[in-house]
Image (cartoon, helix red, strand yellow):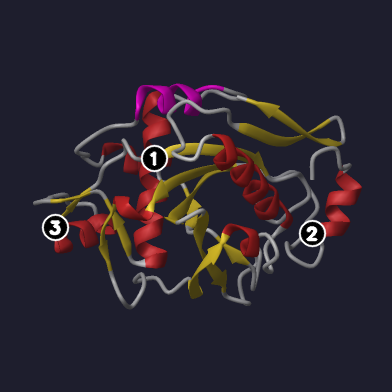
Amino acid sequence: MHGMTKAEIDKAESKDIALGSGPKRTRDAATLILLERKGDNHFVLMGRRHSSHAFMPGKFVFPGGRTDPADSRIPVTTGLHPEEERKLTAGAGRTSAARARAIALSAIRETYEEAGLLIGRKGPFATGKRDWQGFVQYGVQPSLDCVRYIARAITPPGRVRRFDTRFLAAWRSDVAVELPGGGPTNELEELVWLPLTDAKQADVPGITRTILEELEKRLSYDPLLAPGGEVPFYRLLRNQFTRVLL
């Protein structure tokens, strides 16, 4: 998508995303790319969105959703790696350490709600926050030191909904509990582990395919996803979708 004009992006996404007139304020969103390594191959967890959704209906996506600022106050066993926090607070717009923490925790919460996977460490956990009661019930203490910042993308203008999305990653080995029936929200109709090469060919939104290509490239020279790696940032500037590195 790098270098495409707004008109070209609108045409490419017209069947996937509801377009709408007028300015729309972007909202923070967090997405988690869960990875599993099998030999020389990498697999990613993806789910299909319900066809009734206004945003990317029927598409395969990563677990994620809108960031809840209140998530920043959830206790964790370990915080973000300093290099990852530095990257999350860099770039366009002001991102505080608390906001970066909320983004990362929202991605972990959404992964539980949509996929039934609880990331962290086994142990007693207590909070009064309703959205985190699954971690209380299954005895999982959320942890952020495993989270890696992979990419950022801002939805172009002219959509019914616009998001400033941070794409994060973690490994399946960072999951403390896997619920066999998936997450409690049932927002994703189908959950599958796909080889990275196959995921790029699935019915995914254009930006998702772009992020998968970026991830594949990074894994080729950084197979363990070391902290502080380069983060591509996509957004529309002067009528062209641009890519810069954070």
* Element class at badge 3: loop
Mark 3: few/some/many CA within 10 Å (<14, 14-19, 20+): some
**Label 1 – label 3 distance at C-alpha:** 20 Å
Q: Pick whichever of labels 2 and 3 is earlier in the sequence.
A: 2
**Quarter residue 85 falls in:** top left
Left or right of 243? Residue 228 is left
Q: Pick whichever of labels 1 and 2 is earlier in the sequence.
A: 2
Q: Residue at x 37, y 63 (%)?
A: 113
**Quarter residue 245 falls in:** top right
Q: Which residue is mark 2?
A: 13
Using the image, determine if residue 224 lies above or below residue 127.
above
Q: Nearer the viewer, mark 2 or mark 3?
A: 3
Q: Which residues are magenta?
A: 81-90
Using the image, determine if residue 108 lies above or below residue 185.
above
Left or right of 25? Residue 126 is left
Q: Which residue is mark 1?
A: 147
Is most of the magenta stretch helix, strand or loop?
Answer: helix
Q: Which residue is mark 3?
A: 139
